[in-house]
Amino acid sequence: MTFPHIALALLVSAIWGFSFVASKVGLDHFTPLFFTSLRFLMVAALLSPFLKIIKGRMRAIIWIAITVGVCHFTFLYIGINVAGGVTAVAITSQLIAPFSVILAVLVLKETIGWRRVLGIVMAFSGVIAIGFDPVIFNQLEGVAFVAGAAMFMAVGLILMRQIRNVGTMTLQAWISVISVPPLILLSYLIEEGQRESLLSMDWEAFGALLFVVVVTTIIAHGSWYYLLQRYPISVLTPYGLLAPIFGVAFGVLLFSEPITLRFIIGGTITLAGVAIINLRGAKVQSQAVADPEI
């Protein structure tokens, strides 16, 4: 990788890590479902030029929108809101990787070797170890919601693997447009104070919303797609693994969240397991491209 592209990959990871902070700030002002609705409403408006009917793929896109847009982000933001912190959330969100492998085996009938099985065991064991940390124990409900969010994202990723020739921005636009109506309906059915929170929005809440919409959703994801067009996934995977580390660092620096030895050990085990899963998966994918018979 060239130095500018290395810097871009690091910047994307830092943005994804900081998005946990921005989400927490936004959720201190907005209710979770309403915050999610506002996020997708703004993304839909910004990406509206990319909206186009993809013949034969709209049903799959609708299901992706439901699992990723409605379910994943609802569980994620409720989890962040309930947990009250970002360190445990940043680590738990990495369960997307083991959930994706498990679903690929169950749904797509893929076969995996002992390395990825080891990675799955390590990823879940690390999160369990974090859960028994006395500091994190009070955040277990939030951790459970984030684990659920990871599972829904894994389902969405499996669905995404089934469709071809759909641009990243087009898919993001459709996810946003389809997600807004059910999210707004759910928000007004089970939440209160939406109008008041919108009218009393200060610069911090607006900045947080703007960050997750423009910087995280559009700039970071667009930049990552730009890099994926130029480098193998195996080259980029290590940079993506830095996102939760950035998230933990920002949580400690900005919110003075405590870090215990148990958390460090559990987090390290989880990230090591995720690294094994992602790096081995990237290697298998590269081999399959080189030899179509694999």
Image (spheres, grey):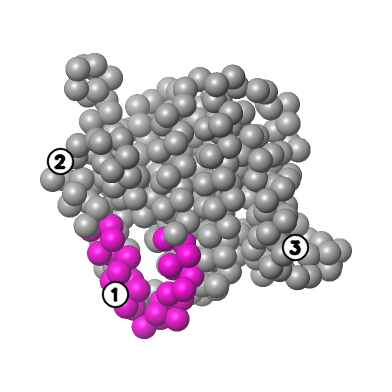
Foreground residue among 6 and 141:
141
In this picture, is 265 found above or below 284? below
Q: Amino acid at mark 2?
A: Gly
Of marks 1 and 3, the one in the foreground: 3
Give the left or right position of residue 182, taking residue 58 as reference. right
Residue 35: percent from left, percent from top: 68, 58
Do residues under tags 1 and 2 come within 8 Å of each other at their CB atoms? no
For mark 3, what is the residue? 188
Residue extent of the magenta highlight: 122-147
Mark 1–mark 3 Cα distance, whole angstroms, equals: 40 Å
Q: What crowding class fits label 1: few (fewer than 14 Cα within 10 Å), some (14-19), or many (20 or more)?
A: some
The residue under the point 59% across, 19% down is 55
Mark 1–mark 2 Cα distance, whole angstroms, equals: 29 Å
For mark 1, what is the residue? 262
Mark 3–mark 2 Cα distance, whole angstroms, equals: 47 Å
The residue under the point 36% across, 83% down is 134
Q: Which mark is residue 113?
A: 2
